[in-house]
């Protein structure tokens, strides 16, 4: 293990100094949640490899397709794929079955977004129970007493709620329905938590960009999307009641609170949900994006380059993540992940 770790760090330093040979592009697919920060890290990684020179390392970048978490996982079995990014972690028994390793890369939040006039962002307050009843079709109007009871002082319109959700296999859907399942026995028994759900009502759209567009175009709409995309699209959003009884606005500090005491373990592939934290001040629909890789890849060269990229993201990418409203991993967790690579992967040994 020590010999691999030394070789890995040596190769990483060579790569980041511009001394590595030009390689094949790294192929990944999956999470739309993490796509913006992966794209930004890819730019920084290539610039870092150039070592400050005006050089483009053709063929050594990150070719990433934001097709949704489920599609990313399914594509990982293809020879040309080097990694999948998923906002739904795989349990350890599935990692073992398919010969995968898994580790977290970045964190953020899933946010209920609405199209309602006259409300400041975050002014609307919603509980998990009300959100579940909206998605169950039991609450169909913004003037419903269950909604107005949470929002004294707000003038809510007599307007039908249009429910928007994802049609593709989505990690955002997994975390959204995990939250609904944690607060609603009816939702849990009828629909549960998954990347694909047979929705009881509403309009299904593809990808996070589809949710953003549909909510923007539809008065009275409600949907769910990653926080950074909410900020960039200037969508209105609701504060959500957490397990401690507080209405918490989605923001990086509230996501970080949900993460602060999370108990990560490399022994189970870091399998962990951040949804419905009991911590005071925690945002209740906090989520992480996980990277999955094959233990025995078709191209060890590309797999090694992928690790170089992830090492760059975890050690030098915090600023880029924060600028896009994500939460970087804590330093202690980053060290756990690096030790996990050394113990579980043999690329280059």
Image (cartoon, rainbow, N blue to C red):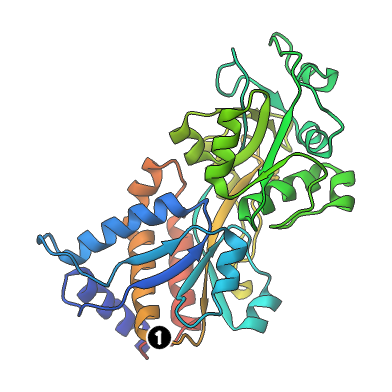
The residue sitting at the bottom extreme is 349
* Residue at image coords 67%, 74%: 92
For label 1, count other residues whose C-alpha is less than 10 Å away and answer few (under 14), some (14-19) or many (20+). some
Q: Nearer the viewer, residue 226 or 101?
A: 226
- So how many labels did they put on this image? 1
Q: Is residue 338 left or right of residue 262?
A: left
- Viewport quadrant of the N terminus: bottom left
Q: Is residue 249 left or right of residue 246?
A: left
Q: For residue 246, say whether it is visible.
A: yes
Q: Nearer the viewer, residue 65 or 263?
A: 65
* Residue at image coords 59%, 65%: 71
67 shown above or below 180 = below
Q: Is residue 320 left or right of residue 290?
A: left
| Quadrant housing residue 218 | top right
Place of residue 90 in the rendered image (x, y in percent of width and height, measured from the top left)? 65, 68
* Residue at image coords 42%, 49%: 36
Place of residue 85 in the rendered image (x, y in percent of width and height, measured from the top left)? 52, 63
Place of residue 165 in the rendered image (x, y in percent of width and height, measured from the top left)? 68, 43
| Quadrant housing residue 170 | bottom right
14 shown above or below 31 = below
Q: Nearer the viewer, residue 248 or 28?
A: 28
Place of residue 69 in the rendered image (x, y in percent of width and height, measured from the top left)? 58, 61
For label 1, the residue is 299
Q: In the structure shown, which secondary structural element does the residue marked by tag 1 occupy?
A: loop
Q: Is residue 90 left or right of residue 340?
A: right
Q: For residue 282, say whether it is visible.
A: no
- Viewport quadrant of the C terminus: bottom left
């Amino acid at each position: 293990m020590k010999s691999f770790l030394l070789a890995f760090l040596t190769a990483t330093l060579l790569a980041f100094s511009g001394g590595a040979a030009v390689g094949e592009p790294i192929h990944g697919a999956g999470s739309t949640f993490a796509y913006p920060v992966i794209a930004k890290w890819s730019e920084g990684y290539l610039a870092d490899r150039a070592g400050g020179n005006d050089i483009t390392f053709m063929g050594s970048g990150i070719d990433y397709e934001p097709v949704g978490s489920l599609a990313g996982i399914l594509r990982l079995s293809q020879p040309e794929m080097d990694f999948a990014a998923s906002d739904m972690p795989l349990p350890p028994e599935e990692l073992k079955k398919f010969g995968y390793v898994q580790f977290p890369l970045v964190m953020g939040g899933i946010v209920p977004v609405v199209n309602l006039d006259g409300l400041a962002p975050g002014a609307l307050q919603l509980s998990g129970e009300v959100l579940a009843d909206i998605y169950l079709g039991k609450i169909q109007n913004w003037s419903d007493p269950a909604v107005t009871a949470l929002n004294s002082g707000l003038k809510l319109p007599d307007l039908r709620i249009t429910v928007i959700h994802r049609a593709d296999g989505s990690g955002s859907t997994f975390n959204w329905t995990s939250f609904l399942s944690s607060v609603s026995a009816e939702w849990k028994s009828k629909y549960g938590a998954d990347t694909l759900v047979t929705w009881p009502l509403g309009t299904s759209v593809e990808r996070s960009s589809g949710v953003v567009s549909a909510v923007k175009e539809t008065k009275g709409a409600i949907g769910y999307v990653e926080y950074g995309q909410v900020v960039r699209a200037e969508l209105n959003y609701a504060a959500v009641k957490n397990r401690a009884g507080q209405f918490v606005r989605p923001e990086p500090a509230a996501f970080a609170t949900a993460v602060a005491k999370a108990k990560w373990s490399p022994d189970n592939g870091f399998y962990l949900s951040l949804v419905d934290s009991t911590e005071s001040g925690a945002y209740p629909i906090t989520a992480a994006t996980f990277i999955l890789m094959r233990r025995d890849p078709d191209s060890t060269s590309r797999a090694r380059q992928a690790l170089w990229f992830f090492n760059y993201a975890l050690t030098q990418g915090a600023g880029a993540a924060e600028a896009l409203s994500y939460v970087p991993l804590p330093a202690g967790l980053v060290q756990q992940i690096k030790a996990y690579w050394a113990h579980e992967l043999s690329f280059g040994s």
